[in-house]
Image: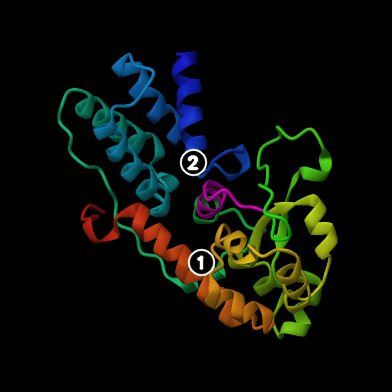
């Protein structure tokens, strides 16, 4: 049982849940654990892995376990048993998310959607903008200087400069994982200031920003200090990723 639990925790780490504080639902762990226990294997068959991937992401972004949790865990565990016995039926749940929904999520508030997006950001292997060094999201780094910190891409302390409220500055779409060292270096500089600086120092800045779901369009708005257009462009990228993971067009069950 303990080994099955360890295997389940390792798997959700692959989904980006490398820290407990961004795990969307703790209830997901025993359901995955049950797969290993029931199958008697320490790995997941490829066909089953694809099914479990779909189940995991649609469970998160449909907020499935936000109510009647024990009942739904039992239903999902029964499904696990069926796929192990050869009935490879998909188990996916419909989601309804928009860019505005993502934008309204405040980093200070508890939200399973927020945690799901943070897992996506973490799984995309974010790197620092200035030098391309990977950001350690767990506590395996020896130096505190390399510790992960939560960075407001548009500085929170200067929200008035962007014509936005404090709540808007705390939007999920204005957040990025970077190292403590880089966070201190940026401090409360405007995006136009620090991005121009790193563009001169780092020829691979665009690739580094891609790891944070910031493409050329979003970057263009950032260097113009255009907050609204930046979060809109970034929100579209993140929503596209959610829709890809959840296979929205084929998610018929609600």
Q: Which residue is mark 2?
A: 25
**Front in this rendered view, residue 154 or 67:** 154
Mark 1 secondary-structure assignment: helix
**Residue 77, picture quadrant:** top left
* Residue at 62% from the left image edge and 64% from the top image edge: 106
Q: Which residue is mark 1?
A: 102
Q: Are marks 2 and 1 in contact (CB under 8 Å)?
A: no
Q: CA distance from mark 2 to mark 1?
A: 18 Å
Q: In the image, is residue 162 above or below residue 45?
A: below
* Residue at 74% from the left image edge and 67% from the top image edge: 198
* Residue at 65% from the left image edge and 77% from the top image edge: 222
Mark 2 secondary-structure assignment: loop
Magenta residue check for 67: no
- Disc 1 crowd, CA 10 A, few/some/many (<14, 14-19, 20+): many
Magenta residue check for 124: yes
Colour setup of the view = rainbow
Residue 72 marker: none
- Region in magenta: 117-127
Q: In the image, is residue 150 above or below residue 9?
A: below
- The secondary structure that most of the magenta stretch takes on is helix
Image quadrant where one finds the C terminus: bottom left
- Disc 2 crowd, CA 10 A, few/some/many (<14, 14-19, 20+): some
Query: Which of the two labelled residues, at mark 2 and mark 1, occupies the earlier sequence position?
Result: 2
Q: In the image, is residue 159 above or below residue 93?
A: below
- How many numbered marks does the figure carry? 2
**Front in this rendered view, residue 133 or 245:** 133
């Amino acid at each position: 049982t303990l080994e099955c639990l360890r295997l389940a925790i390792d798997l959700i780490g692959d989904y980006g849940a490398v820290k407990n504080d961004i795990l969307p639902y703790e209830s997901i762990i025993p359901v995955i654990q049950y797969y290993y226990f029931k199958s008697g294997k320490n790995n997941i068959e490829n066909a089953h892995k694809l099914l479990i991937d779909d189940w995991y992401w649609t469970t998160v972004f449909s907020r499935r376990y936000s109510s009647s949790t024990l009942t739904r865990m039992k239903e999902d565990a029964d499904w696990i048993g069926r796929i192990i016995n050869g009935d490879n039926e998909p188990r996916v749940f419909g989601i309804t998310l928009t860019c505005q929904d993502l934008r309204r999520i405040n980093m200070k508030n508890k939200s399973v959607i927020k945690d799901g997006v943070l897992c996506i950001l973490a799984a995309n292997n974010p790197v620092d903008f200035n030098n391309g060094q990977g950001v350690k999201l767990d506590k395996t780094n020896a130096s505190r200087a390399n510790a992960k910190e939560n960075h407001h891409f548009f500085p929170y302390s200067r929200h008035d400069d962007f014509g936005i409220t404090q709540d808007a500055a705390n939007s999920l779409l204005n957040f990025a994982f970077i190292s403590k060292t880089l966070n201190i270096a940026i401090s409360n500089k405007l995006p136009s200031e620090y991005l121009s600086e790193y563009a001169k120092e780092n020829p691979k800045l665009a690739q580094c920003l891609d790891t944070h779901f910031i493409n050329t369009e979003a970057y263009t708005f950032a260097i113009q200090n255009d907050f609204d257009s930046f979060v809109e462009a970034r929100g579209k990228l993140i929503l596209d990723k959610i829709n890809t993971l959840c296979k929205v067009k084929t998610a018929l069950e609600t």
